[in-house]
Amino acid sequence: MEKLVSLCKRKGFIFQSSAIYGGINGCWDFGPLGVELKRNLKEHWWYTFVLSRDDMVGLDASIIMHPDVWVASGHVEEFHDILVDCKSCKKRFRQDHLETDRCPECGGELSEPRAFNSMLRTKMGVSDDTAVETYLRPETCQSIFVDFKDICSSTRVKIPFGIAQIGKSFRNEVNPRNFIFRSREFEQMEIEFFCREEEEAVWFERWRNDIWSWYLSLGLREDKLRWYEHPKETLAHYSKRTTDVEYEFPFGWGELQGLANRGIYDLTQHSKHSGKDLSFFDAGTNERYYPTVIEPSAGADRTTLAVLCDAYAEDVVKDEARVYLRLDPKLAPIKAAVLPLVKKDGLAEIAEALEKKLRLLFTTYYDHAGAIGRRYRRMDEVGTPYCICVDHQTKEDETVTVRERDSMEQVRMPVSELGTYILQRVSIRPIA
Ligand code: GAP
């Protein structure tokens, strides 16, 4: 982890938030390369689960919602962590994270456990006396339930169908830790899939398969992934069944995504609390009912971290150590670097012009500083899958070499074929 955290900072993937002020615990910033990586990951998720399917629609709802939403959802009542304080070193811990009844830091005596609500509070309104206290959402899914009626009446969706949303969520985590794994501000990629109760087992199984395939499509190693089935006694208040996808991080197995059967809990709760009937009218069968909800709920930051951990690799090339990121090309922040073999002889100008053309098709980078081997290494370290080298032969026959990151093999091809060659290998959507 230390090597990866250092690479992320050095190369502009992930920085500590507000670092010049000493940082703020549990908040992170995605730098110039990190933002591209996470955007690609989210776009791939959206393409897989929304755009390429005919039974899904999307939503982008507000982060701050009416405070009653969180009463209806059960978060005001139920969303608590049980905390204990060390009487000696004053550190605070979640009781369910402790393995002994003494302080894990100093061995001191612990206080009586007490409940602490993990939602982040905020106030909305211009003057203190009229401002309404509400929360920054702790999960994106509640707006999907709250907007269910509007979505059904504004589209022609028929059950079974799903609603997807990607967006920020906030939790006052007691111990944010393991880099971006557990933070206080993070992004979720959630789906609420509405089906008939008698089909819940079938849809649960289909989603299990679809989710698993998606993680494999990110290039994650299958032996680093596993399912964890929650025992009945530890299920969240809304869940009939939950199973998680876990990844083996350098610090141990950690949850990437939950798959839950939420039953009809949320739609009935919001109907009761708002006084608006959120049941679904099925015009085909002339029935009105509350559909059952199957919820695949993933974390964009955790998945980005898993992708980075899985991609980190070291080897030795010509007696020199090489660090490289084996990122799947569709996730890589820079798809191709254009490098003149040497800066002189007009090669830099040809390479720069080529890079300008290619950047309209995919993300590119131009670099002429230092020996070509060094420049290849710099690109390997940030996971760039292709390096295009402009050399003296380019001037004669308009061909270049294309070097692949992992195998380091080079092929020579006409400049006119480059765009299609690379697009076919880096695009999230298939290229016809
Ligand atoms: N709507 C259901 C729900 O929110 P969850 O298991 O609490 O379920 C879903 O969260 C996913 O959100 C997790 O699997 C994880 O990937 C991500 N997540 C939750 N808390 C997080 C945190 N503090 N930091 C980063 N990601 C988090």
Image: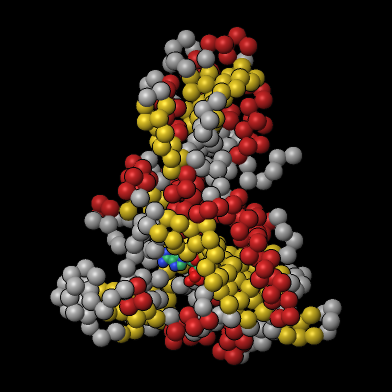
Total marks drawn? 0
At x 57% / y 11%, what residue is drawn? 393
Q: Is residue 430 above or below residue 322?
A: below
- Colour pattern: secondary structure
Q: Is residue 378 visible?
A: no
For the C terminus, the quadrant is: top right
Query: Is residue 236 or residue 428 the one in the foreground?
Result: 236
**Quadrant in which residue 254 is drawn:** bottom left
Question: In the drawing, does residue 120 fall left or right of residue 156?
Answer: left
| In the image, farthest residue toward the left | 88
Query: Is residue 11 or residue 306 the one in the foreground?
Result: 306
At x 69% / y 70%, what residue is drawn? 203
Q: Position of residue 53 (x, y in %)?
A: 72, 59
Q: Position of residue 341 (x, y in %)?
A: 47, 17
Q: Is residue 333 above or below residue 23?
A: above
At x 43% / y 21%, what residue is drawn? 372
At x 40% / y 59%, what residue is drawn? 252
Q: Position of residue 366 (x, y in %)?
A: 47, 28
Q: Position of residue 193 (x, y in %)?
A: 66, 71
Question: In the drawing, does residue 23 fall left or right of residue 140?
Answer: left
Query: Is residue 375 or residue 59 the one in the foreground?
Result: 375
Query: Is residue 186 or residue 152 the one in the foreground?
Result: 186
Q: Is residue 6 visible?
A: yes
